[in-house]
Amino acid sequence: PSMPTGSELEDKEWVLKLNEASEAAGYNRDCCAILRIAIGSQLMGTYGQDKKNMERLTPDFVYSMIFCQGQIKAHQVYAENLGIPSIHIEIPHSDDNLCDFEGYLLDQFQEAVDRLEQMLGRKCDEEKLVEGVKNDWRCRLAMARIAELQKVVPAPIRLKNLISFGVFQWR
Protein backbone atom coordinates (compact mmCIF):
# COMPACT_ATOMS: atom_id res chain seq x y z
CA PRO A 1 0.00 0.00 0.00
CA SER A 2 1.10 3.53 -0.66
CA MET A 3 0.32 5.88 2.19
CA PRO A 4 0.10 9.65 1.79
CA THR A 5 3.60 11.15 1.90
CA GLY A 6 5.59 14.36 1.58
CA SER A 7 3.77 17.05 -0.37
CA GLU A 8 0.39 15.42 0.23
CA LEU A 9 0.90 15.83 3.97
CA GLU A 10 1.82 19.49 3.50
CA ASP A 11 -1.67 20.16 2.12
CA LYS A 12 -3.38 20.81 5.44
CA GLU A 13 -6.87 20.99 3.87
CA TRP A 14 -6.37 17.55 2.27
CA VAL A 15 -5.04 16.05 5.52
CA LEU A 16 -8.06 17.50 7.36
CA LYS A 17 -10.39 15.84 4.81
CA LEU A 18 -8.59 12.51 5.27
CA ASN A 19 -8.92 12.79 9.04
CA GLU A 20 -12.60 13.74 8.78
CA ALA A 21 -13.29 10.74 6.51
CA SER A 22 -11.67 8.33 8.95
CA GLU A 23 -13.38 9.92 11.95
CA ALA A 24 -16.77 9.62 10.16
CA ALA A 25 -16.01 5.89 9.79
CA GLY A 26 -15.44 5.57 13.55
CA TYR A 27 -11.67 6.09 13.82
CA ASN A 28 -11.62 8.95 16.30
CA ARG A 29 -8.83 10.96 17.84
CA ASP A 30 -7.92 8.08 20.15
CA CYS A 31 -6.21 6.57 17.07
CA CYS A 32 -2.86 7.88 15.91
CA ALA A 33 -2.96 10.59 13.24
CA ILE A 34 -1.05 8.55 10.66
CA LEU A 35 -3.56 5.70 11.07
CA ARG A 36 -6.45 8.14 10.55
CA ILE A 37 -4.73 9.68 7.51
CA ALA A 38 -4.07 6.24 5.97
CA ILE A 39 -7.64 5.05 6.56
CA GLY A 40 -9.03 8.38 5.34
CA SER A 41 -6.95 7.99 2.18
CA GLN A 42 -8.42 4.53 1.68
CA LEU A 43 -11.96 5.82 2.16
CA MET A 44 -11.32 8.72 -0.24
CA GLY A 45 -9.94 6.29 -2.85
CA THR A 46 -6.37 7.59 -2.99
CA TYR A 47 -4.59 4.95 -0.89
CA GLY A 48 -2.56 2.71 -3.19
CA GLN A 49 -2.81 5.19 -6.04
CA ASP A 50 0.09 5.38 -8.48
CA LYS A 51 1.14 9.03 -8.33
CA LYS A 52 2.41 8.97 -11.93
CA ASN A 53 -0.76 7.87 -13.71
CA MET A 54 -3.31 8.16 -10.84
CA GLU A 55 -4.29 4.52 -11.36
CA ARG A 56 -5.26 2.71 -8.19
CA LEU A 57 -3.04 -0.31 -7.64
CA THR A 58 -4.76 -3.48 -6.47
CA PRO A 59 -2.47 -6.08 -4.95
CA ASP A 60 -3.28 -9.79 -4.65
CA PHE A 61 -2.83 -9.59 -0.88
CA VAL A 62 -1.53 -7.30 1.84
CA TYR A 63 1.46 -8.31 3.93
CA SER A 64 2.78 -6.35 6.87
CA MET A 65 5.53 -6.91 9.38
CA ILE A 66 5.48 -3.88 11.57
CA PHE A 67 6.00 -2.87 15.17
CA CYS A 68 3.15 -0.35 15.10
CA GLN A 69 -0.31 -1.82 15.63
CA GLY A 70 -1.88 1.22 13.93
CA GLN A 71 -0.07 0.47 10.67
CA ILE A 72 -1.15 -3.15 10.82
CA LYS A 73 -4.73 -1.97 11.38
CA ALA A 74 -4.50 0.40 8.39
CA HIS A 75 -3.25 -2.49 6.23
CA GLN A 76 -6.01 -4.75 7.55
CA VAL A 77 -8.68 -2.16 6.69
CA TYR A 78 -7.10 -1.69 3.23
CA ALA A 79 -7.31 -5.43 2.56
CA GLU A 80 -10.90 -5.57 3.82
CA ASN A 81 -11.89 -2.61 1.61
CA LEU A 82 -10.41 -4.37 -1.43
CA GLY A 83 -11.75 -7.80 -0.48
CA ILE A 84 -8.27 -9.36 -0.53
CA PRO A 85 -6.50 -11.47 2.09
CA SER A 86 -3.99 -10.01 4.49
CA ILE A 87 -1.14 -11.46 6.48
CA HIS A 88 0.33 -9.65 9.46
CA ILE A 89 3.45 -10.50 11.41
CA GLU A 90 3.54 -9.19 14.95
CA ILE A 91 6.99 -8.18 16.08
CA PRO A 92 6.86 -8.11 19.86
CA HIS A 93 8.42 -5.24 21.75
CA SER A 94 11.50 -6.15 23.73
CA ASP A 95 13.85 -3.95 25.69
CA ASP A 96 16.26 -6.85 25.94
CA ASN A 97 16.61 -9.13 22.98
CA LEU A 98 14.31 -10.21 20.16
CA CYS A 99 16.04 -13.59 20.24
CA ASP A 100 13.74 -14.33 23.19
CA PHE A 101 10.90 -14.37 20.65
CA GLU A 102 12.67 -16.34 17.92
CA GLY A 103 10.30 -19.33 18.06
CA TYR A 104 7.25 -17.05 18.07
CA LEU A 105 8.52 -15.13 15.03
CA LEU A 106 9.55 -18.27 13.13
CA ASP A 107 6.10 -19.80 13.69
CA GLN A 108 4.46 -16.64 12.29
CA PHE A 109 6.78 -16.62 9.26
CA GLN A 110 6.10 -20.30 8.51
CA GLU A 111 2.36 -19.71 8.82
CA ALA A 112 2.65 -16.71 6.48
CA VAL A 113 4.55 -18.76 3.87
CA ASP A 114 1.97 -21.56 4.10
CA ARG A 115 -0.93 -19.09 3.67
CA LEU A 116 0.79 -17.36 0.74
CA GLU A 117 1.44 -20.68 -1.01
CA GLN A 118 -2.21 -21.61 -0.54
CA MET A 119 -3.51 -18.18 -1.68
CA LEU A 120 -1.24 -17.95 -4.71
CA GLY A 121 -1.35 -21.61 -5.68
CA ARG A 122 2.41 -21.99 -5.99
CA LYS A 123 5.41 -22.90 -3.88
CA CYS A 124 7.56 -20.27 -2.22
CA ASP A 125 10.80 -19.43 -4.02
CA GLU A 126 13.05 -19.49 -0.98
CA GLU A 127 15.92 -17.67 -2.71
CA LYS A 128 13.67 -14.73 -3.58
CA LEU A 129 12.16 -14.80 -0.09
CA VAL A 130 15.61 -14.60 1.52
CA GLU A 131 16.58 -11.79 -0.88
CA GLY A 132 13.39 -9.87 -0.01
CA VAL A 133 13.85 -10.32 3.74
CA LYS A 134 17.47 -9.15 3.52
CA ASN A 135 16.35 -6.08 1.56
CA ASP A 136 13.65 -5.36 4.15
CA TRP A 137 16.15 -5.52 6.98
CA ARG A 138 18.65 -3.34 5.08
CA CYS A 139 15.89 -0.73 4.83
CA ARG A 140 15.09 -1.05 8.53
CA LEU A 141 18.77 -0.73 9.42
CA ALA A 142 19.08 2.38 7.24
CA MET A 143 16.04 3.90 9.01
CA ALA A 144 17.63 3.10 12.39
CA ARG A 145 20.84 4.85 11.31
CA ILE A 146 18.85 7.86 10.13
CA ALA A 147 17.05 7.95 13.49
CA GLU A 148 20.42 7.96 15.26
CA LEU A 149 21.54 10.92 13.16
CA GLN A 150 18.39 12.76 14.21
CA LYS A 151 19.72 13.01 17.78
CA VAL A 152 21.89 16.01 16.94
CA VAL A 153 20.54 19.52 17.45
CA PRO A 154 19.38 20.79 15.11
CA ALA A 155 18.25 17.53 13.55
CA PRO A 156 19.40 17.18 9.91
CA ILE A 157 15.97 16.08 8.65
CA ARG A 158 12.64 17.71 9.44
CA LEU A 159 10.17 15.37 11.12
CA LYS A 160 7.65 15.41 8.25
CA ASN A 161 10.42 14.34 5.86
CA LEU A 162 11.59 11.63 8.23
CA ILE A 163 8.06 10.26 8.41
CA SER A 164 7.88 10.30 4.61
CA PHE A 165 11.03 8.15 4.46
CA GLY A 166 9.47 5.74 6.92
CA VAL A 167 6.45 5.26 4.68
CA PHE A 168 8.59 3.38 2.18
CA GLN A 169 9.46 0.95 4.94
CA TRP A 170 5.73 0.33 5.57
CA ARG A 171 4.96 -0.80 2.02
Image (spheres, rainbow, N blue to C red):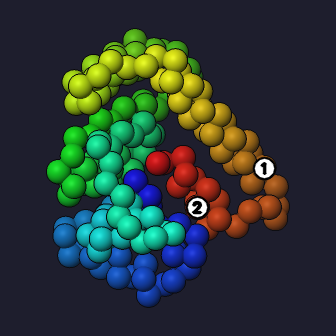
Looking at the image, is mark 1 or mark 2 nearer the viewer?
2
Residue 111 visible in the picture: no
Q: Nearer the viewer, residue 85 or 19?
A: 85
Residue 157 x, y percent position in the rendering: 74, 62
**Which type of secondary structure does the marked residue at label 2 adopt?**
helix
Residue 49, above or below 93? below
Query: Would you name the residue on which mark 1 appears?
Result: 149
Q: Sort mark 2 into few (<14), some (14-19) or many (20+) by Cα contacts within 10 Å.
A: some
Find out whether the residues at labels 1 and 2 contact each other: C-beta distance under 8 Å. Answer: no
Is 129 left or right of 137, judged from the image as shown?
Answer: left
Seen at 58% across and 60% down, the residue is 163
Residue 84 x, y percent position in the rendering: 21, 46
Residue 83 x, y percent position in the rendering: 17, 51
Residue 42, above or below 79? below
Seen at 43% across and 78% down, the residue is 15
Seen at 57% across and 25% down, the residue is 131
* Kind of residue at disc 1: Leu
* Kind of residue at disc 2: Ser
Instruction: Give residue 164's mark.
Output: 2
Cα distance in 3D space between marks 1 and 2 = 16 Å
Q: Nearer the viewer, residue 48 or 166?
A: 48
